[in-house]
Image: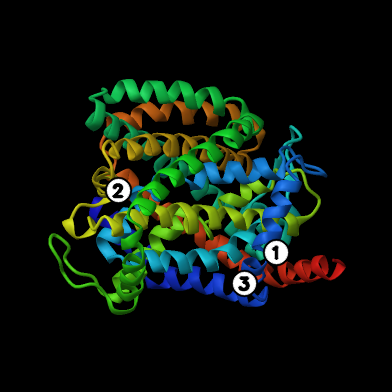
Amino acid sequence: MSELITAINELAWGPPMLVLLLGTGLYLSLGLRFMTVRKIPVALRLLLQGRAGKGEGDISPFNALMTSLSATIGTGNIAGVATAVALGGPGALFWMWITALLGMATKYAEAVCAVRFREQDALGNYSGGPMYYIRNGLHKRWHWLGFLFALFGSLAGFGLANTVQSNSVAEVLNDTFAIPPLATGLILMVLVGAVVLGGIKRIASVASWLVPFMAFSYVLMSLVVLVTHMEALPGAVLTIIDSAMNGTAAAGGFAGASVWAALRFGVARGVFSNEAGLGSAPIAHAAARTNQPVQQGMIAMLGTFIDTLVICTMTGLVIVIMDVWPTGVSGASLTSMAFANAFPGGQYVVTFGLCLFAFTTMIGWSFYGERCAVFLLGTRVIMPFRIAWVIAIPLGALVELDLVWLIADTLNAFMAIPNLIALILLSPLVFSLSREYFDRR
C-alpha cells in the first residue's frame, strides 16, 4: 500500500502538476497585467481600512485573511522550507519565491470567484470555495469537479491538517521536554475543541489575535539572527540564486542537487506552505463581510505574500546563513539546528513556533473540511464533523503517520486539479471584474 501511494504521490506532484500550478499562476498574472504585484500597497491599505467589513457575510475581511493564514502558516513554514533546502539545495528557496509571486494571482482569482459565487446554507452561514464556483459559475458538465474537490477536501484535512500536525507537536515536545505524546494529544484536543466547536466566528476571533502574534514573534526572532549575522546575508542571497540557476554540488552530508531538484522541491514545498492553487483559502474568504469580490481578492493575495515571501524566507535565510544545510539533516530538525547555532536556546524558537503554527492549522482547516462536508451532505453534518475532527487529534499524536501523510499529500494534489481547471475557465470573468473595478477608480 505504501509503495502504491508513493507512486501515485510522485505522479500527482510530478512535472505535469508543477507546470499546471506555475502555468495557471503565470497565465492569471499576465491576464491581470501583474496587478497582484503592483497593488500590494493598495491591498495593505484595504486590509487596514476595512477591518470591520461592509456588506453581507459572517466575518470581517481582516478575520477572513487571518483564518486563511491560520491554516496556511503551519509546519510547512518551518519543516517544509527546511525539507526543500535539504533536498533541493538553497536554490529551492528561489523557486519558492517565484511560486509565491505567481501564486498571488492564483489566490486573488480564487477569492474573487469565492465571493462572487458563494451561497448561504440552511442555517444562514455563508459557504463558498471551488465547489461553489464550479457549480454556480460553470456549465453543468463541469459540476462533477466540484463534487470531487469537496470529497478530497473533506478527507485531506484529517491527514495534513489534523493528525500529522498533532503528531508533529507531540514528537517535538517529547524530544525537547520529554512530554508523553498522549498528554500532548489530549491537551491539543481540548484546546482545538474549545475553538472548533464554536464555528467560524470563534475560529476567526482566535485567529485574528493569535496569527499576527505568532507571525510577528517568529519574524522578529529570525530578524535577530539576520541582523547579528548581517555580513553573511549578501553571500547567502547569492548562494540561493546561484544554486537555483546552476544546481548545488555535494557537500558534507548533502548529496548534491540539480536545477530540476531545486525547482521541483521549491515549487512543491512552496505550494504546500501557501496553498495557492489548492482551493482551500477561498473557503475562508467566502465568509467575509463584503460585496466587493475584487477587494477581497486583493486582501486574499496578501496571504501568499505573508506566508512565503516573509515567513518562509526568514526560515530559509536563517538556514543558509548559519550554513547548516550541508549537514544532511532535514525537516524541523534542520531549522532547529540553525536557530540553536545562532543564539543560546534558539531551538526553543522552533519548538514554540511549531506548536503554535500546528494549532492554528488545525483550527483553520477544520472550517475548510466542514464546508466541504456541508456541500456534500448538508448542514446536518456540521456537528458530527466537528466532533470527529476533535477526536482524531489525540489519535494522530500516538501513531506513526507516514502513510497518512502520503495519502493526504496526494489528496491535496487531487484538490488542486479541479480548482485550477475552474480558475482557467472562469479567468475571463476574473479579468472583467478586475477591469471594471479599477476603471471605476
Amino acid on which the number 2 mark rests in the picture: Thr
Q: Quadrant of residue 91?
A: bottom left
Question: Label for residue 335?
Answer: 2
In the picture shown, does residue 161 fall above or below 388?
below
Q: Disc 1 residue type?
A: Leu
Q: Secondary structure at mark 2?
A: helix
The residue nearer to you, when weighing 108 against 149, is 108
Dots 2, 1 in contact, CB < 8 A? no
> What's under tag 3, amino acid-wise?
Leu
- Mark 3 highlights which residue? 28
Mark 3 or mark 1, which has the lower sequence index?
3
Q: Is residue 124 above or below residue 249?
A: above
> Residue 107 placed where, x, y %?
60, 59
Q: Nearer the viewer, mark 2 or mark 1?
A: 2
Q: Give residue 138's mark.
A: 1
**Mark 3 to mark 1 CA distance (whole Å):** 18 Å
Instruction: Characterize the local packing of mark 3: few (<14), some (14-19) or many (20 or more) Cα atoms within 10 angstroms.
Output: many
